[in-house]
Amino acid sequence: MELTAGNVKVVWEASGEGVCGEYDPDDPNDVELLRFAVYHKTSPYFDWTEVDDASYCTQVPVNTPSETLTVLLARIFNEVYDYVQAGESIKKICERLSWIAVDDAKFAV
């Protein structure tokens, strides 16, 4: 799932990460988690480039309903968009957003 506007894109990615590192499907206490990544396009003629320090594992399970994922992705997008447009670092913002969880969808604006 991704959200794109102009030259900024934020994507949910399932990359096999779990609660304590690599997801272990044999561990009943482990949960496979989603990662978000932020991309920027400097020209319509270039491919998307991942923004530095803007890909983090979250507290959001991969089996989260798509409606909730959409709300959470929009929240991430809204928090980083202006900074990406301005060419500013979003590392600290993304570090904070790595703690985003399903319950945060209730408070998203």
Image (spheres, rainbow, N blue to C red):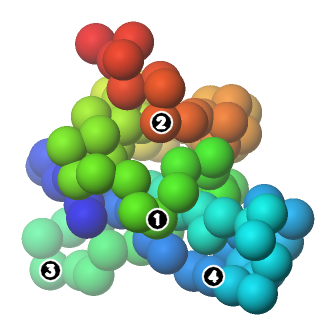
Q: Is mark 1 on a helix, strand or loop?
A: loop
Please report whichever mark, 2 or 4, sits nearer to the chain's N-terminal start: 4
Q: Quadrant of the C terminus?
A: top left
Q: Quadrant of the N terminus?
A: bottom left
Q: Give the number of the disc on residue 45.
A: 3
Residue at 13 percent of width and 49 percent of height: 6
Q: Which amino acid does label 4 sit on?
A: Gly
Please report whichever mark, 3 or 4, sits nearer to the chain's N-terminal start: 4
Q: Which residue is at the front of the view, 47 or 32?
A: 32
Residue at 49 percent of width and 26 percent of height: 103
Crowdedness near tag 4: few (<14), some (14–19) or many (≥20) residues, C-alpha within 10 Å? some
Please report whichever mark, 2 or 3, sits nearer to the chain's N-terminal start: 3
Position of residue 18 relative to residue 47, above or below, is above
Asked whether, in this view, residue 40 is left or right of residue 53, the answer is: left
Q: Give the number of the disc on residue 102.
A: 2
Position of residue 6 relative to residue 107, above or below, is below
Q: Determine which residue is flagged by label 1.
A: 62
Furthest-right residue in this view = 20
Q: What residue type is labelled 1?
A: Val
